[in-house]
Image (cartoon, helix red, strand yellow):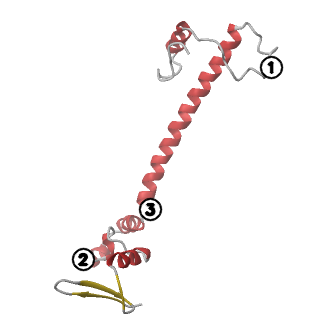
């Protein structure tokens, strides 16, 4: 493959295997081969080679990680793990609230939980309003952080 650029006073032409092509095609061809304008490590400045030679192993490893893009991956992975942990905490809060609501339903209807285990047809819905006193008791017990409370569900 032969890539040639001819620079004139008013023209800037690119040739690939002696066929004229546009600059955008040259850029996309180079990017597909792994060369990018945004990565400064393809052009080595004067004196940088000697700096790379005398670098400590740890610094050289960090530079290689940066060039390979693994540092960006590790940062995004850390952020994703934090988001997952926050989601798990919120899920646990929701499960506690749902459990409390089911217990309150049984207490409100004066139903023995052991006697009603076989009747699962309406266990998934709660069809009675929760008063402000119940929510106040939940808040004073420290269940939740205030985000999960509502006035009259």
Quick check: 112 left or right of 67?
right
Other residues around mark 2 within 10 Å, as few (<14) / some (14–19) / many (≥20): few
* Closer to us: 95 or 58: 95
Whole-number angstrom distance, CA of label 3 to CA of label 1: 53 Å
Please name whichever residue, 128 or 138, is drawn nearer the observer in this view of the structure. Answer: 128
Name the mark nearer the viewer: 3 or 1: 1
User: Are the two marked residues, 2 and 1, in contact with CB atoms closer than 8 angstroms?
Assistant: no
Of the numbered discs 3 and 1, the one sitting upstream in the chain is 3
Q: Secondary structure at mark 3?
A: helix
Q: Earlier in the sequence, mark 3 or mark 2?
A: 2
The answer to whether mark 3 and mark 2 are in CB contact below 8 A is no
Q: Position of residue 54 (x, y in %)?
A: 30, 74
Relative placement, left or right, of 116 versus 27 is right
Kindly report which numbered mark, 2 or 1, lies closer to the viewer in this rendering. Answer: 1
Image quadrant containing the C terminus: top right
Q: Residue at x 45, y 57 (%)?
A: 73
Q: Which image quadrant for residue 105?
A: top right
Above or below: residue 80 compared with residue 101: below
In the depicted structure, whether residue 39 falls above or below residue 90: below
Residue that mark 2 sits on: 45
Relative vertical location of residue 129 with respect to residue 2 in this rendering, above or below: above
Residue bearing the label numbered 3: 70
Q: CA distance from mark 2 to mark 1?
A: 76 Å
When asked about the image quadrant of residue 62, the answer is bottom left
Mark 3–mark 1 CB contact (< 8 Å): no
Residue 1 location, x and y as percent? 42, 90
Residue under label 1, please give it. 117
Q: Which residue is at 53% across, 42% downward?
A: 84
Mark found first going from the N terminus, 2 or 1? 2
Separation of disc 3 and disc 2 at Cα? 23 Å
Residue 126, how many percent across, how many down?
66, 18
């Amino acid at each position: 493959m032969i890539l040639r650029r001819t620079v004139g006073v008013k023209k800037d032409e690119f040739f690939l295997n002696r066929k004229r092509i546009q600059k955008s095609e040259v850029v996309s061809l180079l990017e597909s081969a792994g060369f990018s304008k945004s990565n400064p490590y393809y052009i080595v400045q004067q004196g940088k080679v000697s700096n790379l030679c005398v670098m400590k192993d740890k610094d050289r490893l960090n530079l290689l990680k940066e060039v390979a893009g693994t540092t960006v991956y590790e940062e995004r992975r850390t952020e994703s793990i934090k988001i997952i942990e926050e989601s798990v905490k919120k899920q646990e809060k929701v499960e506690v609230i749902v459990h409390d609501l089911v217990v309150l339903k049984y207490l409100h209807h004066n139903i023995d939980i052991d006697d009603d285990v076989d009747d699962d047809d309406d266990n998934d819905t709660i069809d009675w309003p929760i008063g402000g006193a119940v929510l106040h008791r939940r808040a004073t017990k420290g269940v939740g952080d205030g985000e999960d409370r509502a006035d009259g569900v």
